[in-house]
């Protein structure tokens, strides 16, 4: 992929799933990677894998819903590598499937704090650095649930529609300042998101996230996280130099249905 070698990428939620695949892919492409996650153990595992493979990675513990924590993450990138060229703002959580009227207020707040405020907080910290450099690319992780409604996932769907709106707006605001902002909208992807989901609302243990059983995906299967990472690398590369403000569905054809 053109234009990634020697640059610096920050990936949030890089201890698992899509974020881990993205961090590994950035490293394969020759970028230095700031591996950011709220869970230290898994985040360090990702960073160690990159280092073991000969890459350069730095783990940072971050809670994306806390702006000060996010600011520290960006400081680490700049202090360690001297720039912040790419940001994959990816950390997110899922709730159990609950109808609108049964959503608990606390769970609503928590989900929106991580999935929506977290994306804003990351961009708020990243954009000034990129603007001062005169260049930078941001990719936010939205979801298929950010493009269509999904019964039982109101807070998740609202947060992801919000991510799409933030992405478009940031792209417009910074279009003439050398910064591109896009999002990916993954379809069902084989990750730990179900296991990592908090079970305060709905019995999650009875709902394994088995994408191999997905019947509404035209391609007839769920995605591997590496299939998301490839698109993130492309959107950050110079091959995507005229693409900004878009949300790319990566969904085996779901959005076309
Ligand atoms: P995952 O649970 O495997 O990974 C998410 C990572 O984010 C974990 O390592 C977790 O520790 C981290 N995280 C959670 N809260 C955090 C916080 N407050 N601060 C920092 N890190 C935090 O899940 P995944 O499927 O890889 O999810 C990644 C993104 O992809 C999420 O935004 C999710 O909504 C989105 N997504 C996933 C799917 C899917 O089918 N798996 C589909 C569409 C969108």
Image: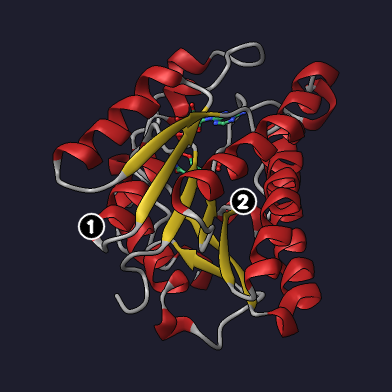
Residue 254 appears in the figure: yes
Report the mark closest to the observer, 1 or 2.
Answer: 1
| Residue found at the very far left of the displayed protein | 53
On the image, the x and y values in percent for residue 67 come to 75, 35
Query: Does 170 appear above or below 122?
Result: below
On the image, the x and y values in percent for residue 35 come to 42, 39
Front-most of residues 97 and 146: 146
Residue at the disc numbered 1: 28
Mark 1 C-beta closer than 8 Å to ligand 1 = no
Query: Does 128 appear above or below 10?
Result: below
Disc number placed over residue 62 in the picture, else none: none
Residue at figure coordinates x 74%, y 29% from the top left: 99
Which image quadrant for residue 109?
top right
Residue at figure coordinates x 40%, y 64% from the top left: 7
Query: Does 162 appear above or below 253?
Result: above
Mark 2 C-beta closer than 8 Å to ligand 1 = yes
On the image, the x and y values in percent for residue 107 come to 75, 20
Label 1 and label 2: CA atoms lie apart by 30 Å
Quadrant location of the N terminus?
A: bottom left
Disc number placed over residue 145 in the picture, else none: 2
Front-most of residues 136 and 215: 136
Residue at figure coordinates x 28%, y 42% from the top left: 212
Check disc 1: other Cα within 10 Å, few if <14, some if 14-19, many if 20+.
Answer: some
- What SS does tag 1 mark? helix
Which image quadrant for residue 190?
top left
Check disc 2: other Cα within 10 Å, few if <14, some if 14-19, many if 20+.
Answer: many
């Amino acid at each position: 992929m053109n234009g990634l070698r020697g640059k610096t990428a920050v990936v949030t939620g890089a201890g698992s799933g899509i974020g881990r695949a993205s961090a590994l892919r950035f490293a394969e492409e020759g970028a230095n990677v700031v591996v950011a996650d709220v869970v230290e153990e898994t985040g360090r595992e990702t960073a160690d894998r990159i280092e073991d493979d000969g890459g350069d990675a730095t783990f940072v513990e971050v809670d994306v819903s806390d702006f000060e924590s996010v600011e520290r993450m960006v400081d680490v990138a700049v202090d360690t590598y001297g720039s912040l060229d790419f940001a994959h703002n990816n950390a997110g959580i899922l709730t159990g499937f609950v109808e609108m009227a049964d959503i608990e207020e606390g769970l609503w707040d928590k989900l929106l704090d991580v999935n929506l405020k977290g994306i804003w907080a990351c961009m708020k910290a990243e954009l000034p650095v990129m603007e001062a450099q005169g260049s930078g690319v941001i990719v936010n992780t939205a979801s298929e649930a950010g493009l269509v409604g999904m019964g039982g996932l109101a807070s998740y769907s609202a947060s992801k529609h919000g991510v799409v709106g933030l992405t478009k707006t940031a792209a417009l605001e910074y279009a003439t300042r050398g910064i591109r902002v896009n999002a990916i909208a993954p379809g069902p992807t084989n990750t730990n998101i179900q296991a990592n989901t908090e079970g305060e609302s709905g019995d999650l243990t009875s709902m394994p996230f088995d994408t191999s059983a997905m019947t509404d995906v035209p391609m007839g299967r769920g995605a591997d996280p590496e299939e998301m990472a490839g698109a993130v690398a492309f959107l950050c590369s110079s091959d995507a130099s005229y693409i900004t403000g878009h949300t790319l569905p990566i969904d085996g054809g779901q959005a076309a249905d």
